[in-house]
Image (cartoon, rainbow, N blue to C red):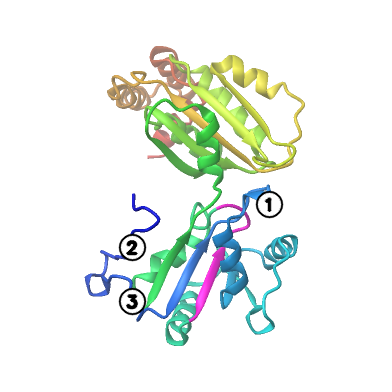
Amino acid sequence: MPTKNESVTGQNLHFDHLKNNYQTHPAQRAKISMIATPIGNLSDITPRAIHALEHCTELWCEDTRHTQNLLNALHINRPHDQHRLRRFDQHTMEKDLIKLLERVQEQGQWIGVVTDAGTPGVSDPGAKIVEKISQFPEIKIEPIPGVSAVSTLVSIAGFTDNSFKFQGFFPRERKDALELLASLDEGASIFFESPKRIRETVEVLKVWTEGLDFTPKFCFAKELTKIHETIYSGTGIQFIEFFLGQDFDERGEWVFSIVLPNGCLKNKKAVAEWELTLECLIEAEIPTKSAAQIVAQKFRIAKNLAYQKALDLQKK
């Protein structure tokens, strides 16, 4: 890592469009800064983030009202000619984004991108901006790092391996959720969840955990860095049942992890085996419910998962 006195030549390369590969240099007048903001505690804001929020030409944000509240709380008064906050969310059309980037490049503007909380581009619309930047060689992309719910959870979850997988928001549909859980690899997976769905998600985890022949580890955290920060952690079905029995406040965003112990999936062929067995039973015209029950007992998997798969096979 360079020391304070060493000069550093920044590189900003895009390999998906070779003609647009470049090394950042003064000719790149336009710049887009991905600005990390606090996930709850305002003290977590960095000096670089404050400078960017104060001086960028325009701020692109998921919710202009939310961002304005943040600016007010930080006592940031942007110059009148640079006051504009532009809404940029999942509903922004690709053609509109291209027009915005064309303007940024032509006018040499400095754009700050923020999410409602945390680091933009992590399971939020900011990723769409970065994806399109390679088409605009005169725009520099700049990360201004800070807090992220993902890294914050990692710091207190106690992962012993050196890797984890961030999966974004947990699936809404029960079928999709069970299929995802059945496909998890060994090691840690991290998910986001909304306060309105957290209990339903834990109910799905209960169904999944009951059918396992190993003990997964869980860590659930809500309102990280805030006054009412709460962290639950434990292992196996006993923890899930305890967690569901808590009279906890469901307000506040959640982030949680699931860790599958090393060696628990020694033979991943088992998944293919139970699916093949189930398919043979269905083809032999064994009733769906009975076929699912046979497979669930034989291969020790969740009955709901086997039954849903049986229904899918019947439709083919």
Crowd band around label 2 with a 10 angstrom C-alpha radius: few (<14), some (14–19), many (20+): few
From the viewer's perspective, tell me whether residue 48 is left or right of residue 64.
left
**Which quarter shows the C terminus?**
top left
Could you give the CA–CA distance between mark 2 and mark 1, rounded to whole angstroms? Answer: 32 Å
Q: Which of marks 2 and 3 is nearer the N terminus?
A: 2
Q: Residue furthest left?
A: 18
Q: SS class of the residue under badge 2?
A: loop
> Which residue type does callout 2 highlight?
Ser
Front position in the image: 261 or 77: 77
Residue for badge 1: 42
Mark nearer the viewer, 2 or 1: 2
> Which residue type does callout 3 highlight?
Pro
Residue for badge 3: 137
Front position in the image: 205 or 126: 126
Q: Position of residue 10 (x, y in %)?
A: 33, 64
Q: What stretch is highlighted in magenta?
A: 109-118
Q: For residue 198, which quarter of the picture?
A: top right
Q: SS class of the residue under badge 1?
A: helix
Q: SS class of the residue under badge 3?
A: loop
Mark nearer the viewer, 3 or 1: 1
For the point 38% across and 24% down, the residue is 285
Q: Position of residue 25 (x, y in %)?
A: 33, 75
Crowd band around label 1 with a 10 angstrom C-alpha radius: few (<14), some (14–19), many (20+): some
Q: Earlier in the sequence, mark 2 or mark 1?
A: 2
Residue for badge 2: 7
Q: Residue furthest bottom?
A: 106
Q: For residue 240, which quarter of the picture?
A: top right
